[in-house]
Amino acid sequence: MERAEYERMHAVEDRMWWYRGLRALAASELARALARSAAAGPVLDAGCGTGGMLRVLGATTGGRPTFGLEYDAIAASLAAAKAGRPVASGSVNEMPLGDATLAGYVSLDVLCHGGVEPGRALKEAHRCLRPGAIAVFNLPAYGWMLSAHDKRVHNVRRFTRGQVGALLSAHGFRVLRSSYWNTFLFPLMLLHRLIERDDAESDVRDYPAWLDAIFSTALAVERALIGMGLNLPFGGSLIVVAARNE
């Protein structure tokens, strides 16, 4: 990403509604899946940015230790300080890890990035995960929703649920859960995309407290519905839980 975007993310990710909602959803889905997995080993936050998700995961998640991997050396340093966890510098396209060492793999808005080759990254994830290990992916939805913000953070692709399912299946994973989310706010997102300019303000920023509370509540309701097993039919993002084939 552009340096300014890393700085914005580092500054607001612990309090902005979007990051809080995303990480709560990913953490809950990961914990639920790990509880049903016999795979041992650590959990990797692959492409951990400035460490917000790694901090949410804590020292352990599902009884497994956590650590991060980040391509940008400055972001990796910030992540290690923020989360208090080890963070390696490296690419998800070629991870500095041994074969079959991981019990879990978290990938939040990484496969969409211009510097990432989705097939190669998934091949690496498959190599490093143990059989039956868990992978959780968050991805932006719908290619036609590419925005000024996507360009700013170097996102070059968005996905449908079918595309993600086919991609994972082709690289040795089986999908356990797949749901769109950010559904209730999707009409606002669509309107924003239609009227925004190429030089629009970054989406990563502080919002008025009342608006942040409304958006946070919408995501909390969605998280509860997904937690009860409901797959939402559309939305601005996709959350996907998969297992490495035995």
Image (tube, grey):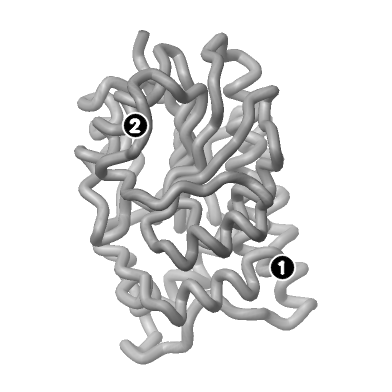
Q: Is residue 232 above or below residue 236?
A: above
**Secondary structure category for the residue under label 2:** helix
Task: Inspect this view and state whether residue 233 appears.
Answer: no
| Left or right of residue 44, residue 151 in this image | left
Q: Report crowding for label 2: few under 14, some 14 to 19, many 20 or more residues within 10 A (C-alpha).
A: many
Task: Compare residues 137 and 5 and report the one nearer the observer.
Answer: 5
Occupied quadrant, residue 194: bottom left
Q: Position of residue 29 (x, y in %)?
A: 60, 33
Task: For marks 1 and 2, give the CA distance.
Answer: 30 Å
Q: Report crowding for label 1: few under 14, some 14 to 19, many 20 or more residues within 10 A (C-alpha).
A: few
Return the residue at label 1.
15
Q: Position of residue 133 (x, y in %)?
A: 47, 19
**Secondary structure category for the residue under label 1:** loop
Task: Inspect this view and state whether residue 157 appears.
Answer: yes
Give the foreground label among 1 and 2: 2
- Please, what is the three-letter code of the amino acid marked with disc 2? Ala
The residue sitting at 43% across, 70% down in the picture is 190
**Which label's residue is closer to the chain start, 1 or 2?**
1
Q: Position of residue 183 (x, y in %)?
A: 54, 54
Q: Is residue 30 above or below residue 14?
A: above
